[in-house]
Image (cartoon, rainbow, N blue to C red):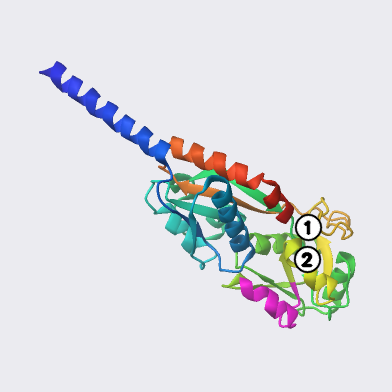
Amino acid sequence: MCGLIRALGLAVLATLCAASSARAQDYPARPIRMILPANAGSLPDVLARTLSARLQERANWVTVINNRPGGNFIIGNAAAAQAAPDGYSILFAVSTMTQLPATQKSLPYDTMRDLAPVTRVGAAPTMIAVHPSVPARNLRDLIAWSKANPGKLNYGTGGAGSTTHLTGEFIRLESGLDWTNVPYRDSTRVMPDLLNGLILATITVPGNLLQQFNAGKLAPIAVIGSRRSLVIPDVPTTADAGFNIPIGDAWFGVMVPARVSNEIVATLHREVVAAVQSSELRQQY
C-alpha cells in the first residue's frame, strides 16, 4: 500500500511538472498586463509603451499597459505584488520603489517578499532645471540667489519620498541650496506648472526638457552626479560645482509577482533584454 501511494504521488508530481513545463513553453498564450504605477503621458508611461511596441515587433507579444497611478507609485506596485503569479501581470518598476520602505510608515506589500526582478530596462541621469525668471544659470549662482531670497525657491517632484524628492534633499543638505519641495500627486502636472511659473524649479531627466531649453522656456542648471548627460553634454554636473550627491539617476525595470515560475521569468528576461537592446529603442532613449 505504501509503495502504491508513493508511486501515485510521484506520478502526480511528474504530471504537474510536465504541465508546468508545457505552460512555460506556451507562454505567453494571451495578452500580458503591464502594470504601470504612473500616469499616462509621464516618462515611465512613454518608456513602457515603447517597450510594449518593441515586444510586439520582435516576439509578437501583446502587452496591455494598465496605468495605476497614485500614492507615490504604491498603488501600482501593490497591484502587481498581489496579482496572480502566472506571468500575465508584470510591473514596469521605477526607482522610487527602492526608497519607499524607508520613507513610508507602512506598505500594503513587502517588496522583497512579494516581488521578483526580471531585468533593468534602463537608467537616466536627472538634472535641475528652472523657470527663466530665476536669475541663475549654474548651481553656484542658484545657491547664492536662494540664500539671498530665503523661502522663495521651490521645486516640483512626483511625490514625497520619490527619487527626485530625496535627491533634492541631498542637494539641499550638501550644498546649502535653500529650496522647498512641492510634491505632486500627478507628476504630469509638474511641467505645465513650471512652464507657467507656478513653481520655479524641478528635478527630472534631461530628455524631458530639450524642447523647452531650445525655446528658452526653461533653463538648465546642473546634471546631478559626476557624469554629464549625453543628451545635453554642455551642462555641467553637481560634481563640477564641487558637490558630491550620492543619488540622482532614475532607473526603470520589469518585475513580477514573487511566485512566477523560473521558466517564465527566464522567458521574460530574454525577450525584454532583446527589446531593450534593439537599435530602435537605443536610439529613442
Quadrant showing the N terminus:
top left
Asked whether, in this view, residue 161 is left or right of residue 263, the answer is right
Q: Residue furthest top?
A: 3
Between 17 and 225, the one nearer to me in the picture = 17
Regarding residue 120, the answer to whether it shows in the image is yes
Regarding residue 285, the answer to whether it shows in the image is no
The residue wearing badge 2 is 128
Sort mark 1 into few (<14), some (14-19) or many (20+) by Cα contacts within 10 Å: many
| Count of residue discs | 2
Q: Quadrant of residue 52?
A: bottom right
Instruction: Tell me the kind of residue under disc 2.
Output: Ile
Residue 212 placed where, x, y %?
79, 73
Between 138 and 81, the one nearer to me in the picture = 81
Quadrant showing the C terminus:
bottom right
Q: Residue at x 62, y 58 (%)?
A: 47
The residue wearing badge 1 is 224
Asked whether, in this view, residue 57 is left or right of residue 201, the answer is left
Mark 1–mark 2 CB contact (< 8 Å): yes
Q: 249 above or below 151? A: above
Q: Which residue is drawn at 80% across and 53% down?
A: 244
Residue stretch rendered in magenta on the structure: 188-201
Q: 11 above or below 104? A: above
Considering the numbered disc 1 on the image, is that residue within a helix, a strand or a loop? loop
Between 175 and 211, the one nearer to me in the picture = 211
Q: Which residue is drawn at 77% across and 80% down?
A: 152
Q: Residue at x 54, y 54 (%)?
A: 92
Considering the numbered disc 2 on the image, is that residue within a helix, a strand or a loop? strand
Q: Quadrant of residue 158?
A: bottom right
Disc 1 or 2, which lies upstream in sequence?
2
Between 278 and 229, the one nearer to me in the picture = 278
**Can residue 85 be found in the magenta stretch?**
no
